[in-house]
Amino acid sequence: MTQSPPLPAASEPEVLRFSRLNRTLHITMIVSFMSLALTGLTLKFSYTRWAGIVSRFFGGFESAGYIHRFAAVIMFGVFVAHLVDVVQIKRRERLSLRQLIFGPGSMLFNRKDLQDFVGNIKWFLGKGPRPHYGRWTYWEKFDYFAVFWGIAVIGLTGLMLWFPVFFTRFISGWVLNVATIIHSDEALLAVGFIFTVHFFNTHLRPEKFPMDIVVFTGRMPLEEFKRDKPAEYEALVKAGTLDSYLVEPYPDIVIRAVRFFAWTALGVGFSIVLWIIFAMLFDYR
Amino acid sequence: MTRLRLPPELLVLLAAAAFWTTPAQAQENVDCLACHTERSLTGTRAGKTISVFVNEKTLAGSVHGPLPCVACHADVAGKELPHGDDLAPVDCGSCHAEIAALHAKSLHGKAIARGDPLAPRCTTCHGSHDVLPKTNARSPIMPLNVPFLCGKCHQEGTPVTSQRTIHQDNILTNYSESIHGEGLLRRGLIVAPNCASCHTPHSILPHTDPASSIARRNIAATCTKCHAQIELVHRKVIKGALWEQEAHVLPACPDCHQPHKIRKVFYTQGMADADCMRCHGRADLKSSRDGRSLLVHQDSLLASRHVRVACSQCHAGVNASRVRPCETVVTKVACSSCHAEADSLYQTSTHGMLEAKGDPNAPSCSECHGTHGTKGRTDPSSPTFPPNIPTLCARCHREGKKAAVRYTGEQHQIVEHYAESIHGKGLLKSGLTVTATCTSCHTAHRVLPRADSSSSVNPRNLPQTCGTCHHGIQEQFQKSIHSVLVSKSGKPLPVCSDCHTAHTIQRADATGFKLEIMTKCGRCHEDVARTYFDTYHGKVSQLGYAKTAKCYDCHGAHDILPISDPASHLSRQNVVGTCQKCHPGATRRFAGYLTHATHHDPKKYPFLFWTFWGMTTLLLGTFAFGGIHTLLWLPRAVQMRRELQAIKEQQRRTQEPS
């Protein structure tokens, strides 16, 4: 397999991995998620000094509340836009429901994910080679469904707390107390998981250092693509469609802007994790 | 004993009868008593059934005992017995004509003529069949009994005092505390004047009537009936006979010696202010003892509230017959000689008790009220004028000053705090003289520490003290579970200052106050305050959001009642309405929200407890899985990084030569 149209030597060829819409949605979701996390955690950890500072940063509790709800609406928007996108992809590519669910591009777990997981553990323990990952690895799928589940659970309980008068037409008042616990603990899970495990798995793995920004640029170098997604690479080569995914890399200025944004998000995320740990250790109640 | 009550319409008849009847032709008393000793005997007068029983013994013992019945009941004379009903009222004037004439002209007589049902008649004071001489101790007109006889109508609470215009108040009380009353009632001096001594027994007239014994021009004559030659000791006032001759230009006795309240003060004879000022008007006058100036500024004296008080009234003990009348003065000025009431309060106060102990720090009257220039509290230039009071008290009670230094309690910076409080702002910034100042709560003269059970700021008395202005609040509070009148729990109960503080009182709608209330309630209600902070309302309040539901938004502020009380804001009937104050459209289900819920109590809140632990398990599980996965990965990732760097290094080296 050779690269038939020789690319300019100056730039290595890159593989387009995320569509423009997906990249936009991820960035929007980051902003929305960070806002939700910061404003929400001030309430969860309201008894810490930190909470007061962050709350004041958002213009006091009242405006922090408005920001929280506004960001939640954005998050719902991202969710809906993604679902619409999935439906459109299905139509455009004329995929059957079966292909959508069990095809190589599917986000649903399949047998290969189980094999990859077992293979990965073996590799970690030095008892086997690195598995040949496909388009989506199992940890990427896990993160994806964490968001699905999170939006459903946090979103529903959040709506209950947003419109208590409406919801208590159907449910008892104490369910709101339960909803509060679920909303806040599930959010804590999401925040904790995203800002530690997800950050490591996808952005900060040592071999990717300083940072994997594929989700912002949508492009990854061909070499890296070959190494990280061998199964997909082979499938594309086999189908002869690899060329259609090759694109020009972004100019330096864009990369720098992306890195700046990504580092900011990382910084905020890590600060939040530190705050949570601090609150849990010294102030928990 | 029945008393004859004469219906006024019969008065005319009575007068007419007095002229044509004579006691000569009469039935024997035994004839009358044959029937009238029957206790159950009744007759009618003006349509009313009345008892006509006559106690034979009482009649025989009375001054009128020897008289035949018909001497008084003249219209029965010569009639056939038994006589008919509706006899004419007895006319005492048929014998006591002079007295009856005096009485008819008096206030009381005119009132009878007007038909005033409250007007006293002969019998009201003297009785009917039981008339006794005034020397008889049982007689109501015996001098010792007179104050009580008059007092029957002329004391607080009687229909006369409440329904008729009487210009003096507390007459009987004041009289009994006056030197006259004391002489008569405590010392038993029957020569001491009673009511009738000044007002006369029968020709009682208002002091505005020139004929009255207490009219301005007659009062001296009335008083000198006993106080003969009193003018000799009032020489400066009366200049000999002026008092009587030109009574209209001179003060009359009651101008100084108020009626009924005649003070037990020894007024020093014969000193006039001019006599004093001859020396004390000189700027170089110094005390021989300590060299301090003894100059008295005439101006300040004239501008003072005591402008009409003579020097010797305060500086008691002068001897007018000495060349230096003041050399006999040995005692300090005693304000109590006039201000007895304020002084007795002061004596029981901390200030007074310290003073009694001879403490040099103790404030005396003059410390607050000044000396010669003393002014009333309504005078804006007076230190006791309300806006000046904080400064006045601050002289000693400001931090570092002599009273603040010896104080060991919790209140500090009180002057500064007060000035920033709602009361201080009202007084000092808004200029509201009705705002509470130091003395409004601590009283002016009876200042006592909070720990003293009779102190106005003692917890037991505080609601009452605050209630003097905040009456509506006090009414609510006294019905609440926090009131000692309601709660029988025996636990310590909060009073106004526990929530509102003493000197840093804020407006209750200030954000600071709103947010502090939780910790204040939480001092006693620890558990509920803690769990409140676990719920939404508590958390947002902790972030400084004052609009959220705070303790009093749901429980009420001053009218807190147990939830079991139907009148409570949170009783079953009221709770939904209470939620609706902030959440319009709230339903009973909505009110089921647990406002004091905690997920730490599996017995009380099992749902919350298990939800929390379910979520916690999910969290711990996920993090454990993710964490272990990541940690296992780390060595391989580092190894991969090294390999990649090695490859890159190799590529660089292979490319460099080319």
Image (cartoon, coloured by chain):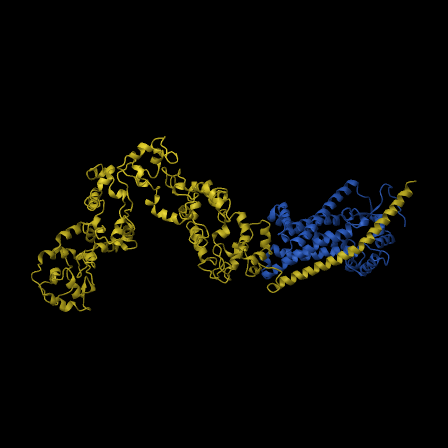
Chain colours: A blue, B yellow
Q: Where is residue B556 in the image (x, y as percent from the top left)?
A: 50, 55
Q: How many labels does the image show?
A: 0
Q: Is residue A148 visible?
A: yes
Q: Where is residue B447 in the image (x, y as percent from the top left)?
A: 42, 48
Query: Taking B487 as reference, is B272 left or right?
Result: left
Residue B146, by quadrant, is bottom left
Q: Position of residue A170 (x, y in %)?
A: 60, 61
- Is B571 in front, or is B321? B321
Q: Position of residue B347 (x, y in %)?
A: 38, 48
Q: Can residue A94 be seen in this view?
A: no
Give the residue furthest to the left.
B24
In the depicted structure, whether residue B125 falls above or below residue B363: below
Quadrant in which the C terminus of chain A appears: bottom right
Give the residue furthest to the front.
B289
- Is B300 in front, or is B533? B300
